[in-house]
Image (cartoon, helix red, strand yellow):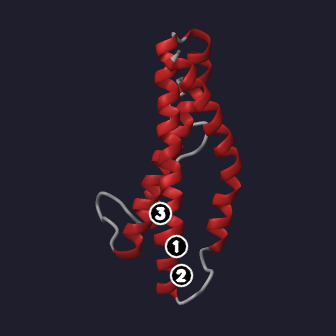
């Protein structure tokens, strides 16, 4: 497979460039722009995780050993834990602080609603992964 066709973990879901915040090696962002750059990096980390899961699930399912499947399910579980923790921190600490600093109550409500769109699917994913983890331990 040529280097241009290798499915690295920067797809299928696109990463978020911190340059959108004005951050660069030559001129690092500061203040709220730095916060935006860091949030871009954190979201890209989460996106790389789901991309890795998406790209490797078939390989592990078709060719993985019992241990490979347990290891992969543990990776999936940790990724889902990190996503839940990230959403919790945003919703309980970061978003309320942004609302207060901006002086606009409810400014970040759309982001909370966006998170809610994940919840049922993430819960189903975690239940499925938990079953695989349990089977792998037996």
Q: Secondary structure at mark 1?
A: helix
Number of the label disc, if any, that sits on residue 95: 1
Q: Earlier in the sequence, mark 2 or mark 3?
A: 3
Number of the label disc, if any, that sits on residue 89: 3
- Callout 3 crowding tier (Cα within 10 Å): few <14, some 14–19, many ≥20: few
Q: Secondary structure at mark 2?
A: helix
In the visual, does 23 lie left or right of 74? left
Whole-percent x, y for residue 65 in the image: 51, 10
Q: Earlier in the sequence, mark 1 or mark 3?
A: 3
In the visual, does 54 lie left or right of 97? right
Of residue 30 and residue 72, the one placed in the foreground of this image is 72
Of residue 85 and residue 97, the one placed in the foreground of this image is 85
Q: Residue at x 47, y 14 (%)?
A: 67
Q: Outermost residue toward the left?
A: 26
Tell me if residue 131 comes above or below residue 83 in the rendering: above
Q: Residue at x 41, y 71 (%)?
A: 33
- State the separation of the CA atoms marked 2 and 3: 14 Å
Of residue 115 and residue 50, the one placed in the foreground of this image is 115
Does residue 97 appear in this view?
yes
Of residue 17 and residue 59, the one placed in the foreground of this image is 59
Q: Residue at x 37, y 68 (%)?
A: 34
Whole-percent x, y for residue 51 in the image: 56, 36
Tell me if residue 25 comes above or below residue 46 in the rendering: below
Task: From the image, tell me which residue sits under label 2.
Answer: 99
Q: Residue at x 40, y 74 (%)?
A: 32
Q: Are marks 2 and 1 in contact (CB under 8 Å)?
A: yes
Q: Outermost residue toward the front?
A: 138
Tell me if residue 95 comes above or below residue 53 in the rendering: below
Q: Secondary structure at mark 3?
A: helix
- Callout 2 crowding tier (Cα within 10 Å): few <14, some 14–19, many ≥20: some
- State the separation of the CA atoms marked 1 and 3: 9 Å
């Amino acid at each position: 497979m040529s280097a241009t066709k290798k499915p690295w973990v920067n797809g299928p879901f696109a990463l978020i460039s911190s340059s959108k915040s004005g951050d660069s090696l030559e001129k690092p962002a500061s203040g709220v722009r730095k916060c935006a750059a860091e949030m871009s990096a954190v979201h890209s980390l989460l996106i790389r995780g789901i991309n890795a899961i998406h790209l490797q699930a078939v390989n592990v399912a078709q060719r993985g050993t019992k241990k490979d499947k347990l290891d992969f399910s543990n990776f999936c579980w940790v990724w889902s834990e990190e996503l839940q923790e990230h959403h919790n921190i945003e919703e309980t600490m970061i978003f309320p602080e942004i609302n207060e600093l901006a002086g606009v109550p409810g400014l970040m409500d759309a982001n909370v609603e966006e998170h809610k769109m994940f919840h049922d699917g993430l819960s189903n994913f975690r239940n499925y992964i938990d079953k695989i983890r349990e089977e792998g331990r037996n």
